[in-house]
Image (spheres, coloured by chain):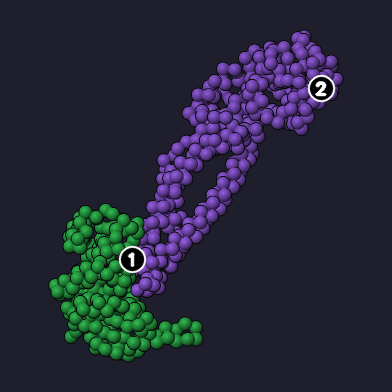
Amino acid sequence: MMNEDISNKLDALGANIIILPQSDDLSLSYGGMSIGGVAFDTQTLKDADVPKIRQIEVRENISTISPKIIGVVQIGGKKVPLIGVLFQEETRLKKWWKVRGTVPKSQEEVLLGNEVAVKLFKSTGDPLTINGKRVRISGVLDETGSQDDFLILGELALVQGLLKKPGALSLIEVSAFCISCPIEEIVRQISKELPHAKVTAIKQTLETKMEALGHFKKFSIGISVIVLLIGGLIVFTNMMASVNERKREIGIFRAIGFRKSHVVRIIFLEAFIIGLIAGMTGYVLGIGVSQVIGPMITGTKGLRIFIDPLLAIGAVFLSALIGILSSAYPALHASKMDPTEALRAL
Amino acid sequence: MSLIEINTLSKTYESGEECVLALVDVDLKIEKGEFVSVMGPSGSGKSTLLTILGGLNHPSRGEVVVDEIPIYKLPLERLADFRREYLGFIFQSFQLIPYLTVIENVMLPLAITEKSNREQVQMAEGILERMGLRGKERRLPDQLSGGEQERVAIARALINSPPILLADEPTGNLDSKTGKEIMDLFKSLNEEGQTIIMVTHNLENLAFSSRTIQLLDGKIVDGI
């Protein structure tokens, strides 16, 4: 559905839940890069924890799970932070990455942040030796303005090996999105699965996501209101023309004893029926067109369009209501027509 | 008391600064069972008289009393009810609804009554049979001849069994043979007790009516 697709798009804003090892004295600042001095020995997160997150009740709301290991290595006498990630997940979260070269595709390759590359005088294709292992630099990140500029990034398993901590994780970033439930619920459920970890929601990211979605909703509502107004106006002019064309007919109705209220009812009934038919046609056409146009606009393949029966009924009745409201004045006008004028022949 | 009493009835039409006197102090009584022809040249006020009698045109002065009801003192919606219960209209050029079938046109005045659909169909079929239109119930008006359309219009006017039948030039659009047939039909309806008021130009029609009223410049000059 649209919301789902938008939430996928919004993942580009980054993760919104961070899972850290449970530790009282740990003050790890991944963003600010003050990872030095972090007690890495308090590793309590493992590779095995990742599938557990996938088992929570509201798992369909989790879009990306990105486990990471962080350490510091000495290269040419310089201390450089080394981070192990799953590139497949990481690239989903960090859509803004521009790589000169490619993202590592094997355990023999690493990716360098811009600053690190400059500091180490390295560029794409150069070899690099980390803790005695010789790897190839498959690519260098363009400047991102974030912590990524100061990192060496490698496949998770490679870095775990280099840091001699197989199976260990420093943190897990999760990108979750839930339209109907609060993020706290997702946090609570993950905490339940991982009692040894500290699960924190990054509110700001989520709020940005919600805000973006809110703007989009407002925009959609605005467009809908304009469409409804235009639709109402079209019904109004058509009904007015139809009533004027049928002056004679309305005159006959009045002459043979129809009350004004009967004439109003006839016009309303007509508007209601036309509105119903228009609503049904519009809904079916709308569904059909969005199947074709939807993926073009959102740039997503396989966008699913659900048929919500409540929405369908609502749309059809809204259309009928617009028909009736827009016909109020034409109906009144018709009921006030002078029957003798309408039946000039008399 | 007469079925219809018209007392000092006047109607003035104002168009801009001009003031047209359509009817001037008309007094008229029509008894139950009469067949009255209204004659007069164009602009003499015949049509105005018919629309006022038909409860469609408020007079400028005077009153119209039908069956002891001063009809123009009724609220507008009640006046519509009066038309439905007391009057059957036969309009010039038939005025059938083109997209309704013959039987639907005839049933039209019943559409706003409490009668069940089945009852309405039965009544319409009965009156159509009387009009000699059996087998043509499902046709559209434009699939009928002029005489047949006139009969549908008469059937529609009679379906409510109204005490008064108002007809405006009922033979105006028919050839003389068909016109005579229609007048024969009117005559037989009148003989059964139907009160008929007919506006006509055709002198031949006068022979069928029991009284002729001559109008000239908004005044009755003969037939009071």
Dot 1: element: loop
Q: Amino acid at mark 2?
A: Ala
Q: Residue at x 84, y 23 (%)?
A: A118
From the image, state whether disc 2 or disc 1 is nearer to you.
Answer: 1
Give x and y (percent) for residue A282. Answer: 47, 45
- The chain letter under disc 2 is A
Q: Residue at x 77, y 23 (%)?
A: A100
Q: Colour of chain A?
A: purple
Q: In screen coordinates, is A115 left or right of B165? A: right
Q: Quadrant of the C terminus of chain A?
A: bottom left
- The chain letter under disc 1 is B
Viewer-nearest residue: A180 or A222: A222
Give x and y (percent) for residue B90. Answer: 28, 70
Dot 2: element: helix
Which label was assigned to residue A45? none
Residue under label 1: B95
The chain painted green is B
Q: Residue at x 51, y 56 (%)?
A: A234
Residue under label 2: A117
Q: In screen coordinates, is B175 left or right of A134? A: left
Residue A157: quarter of image? top right
Q: Amino acid at mark 1?
A: Gln
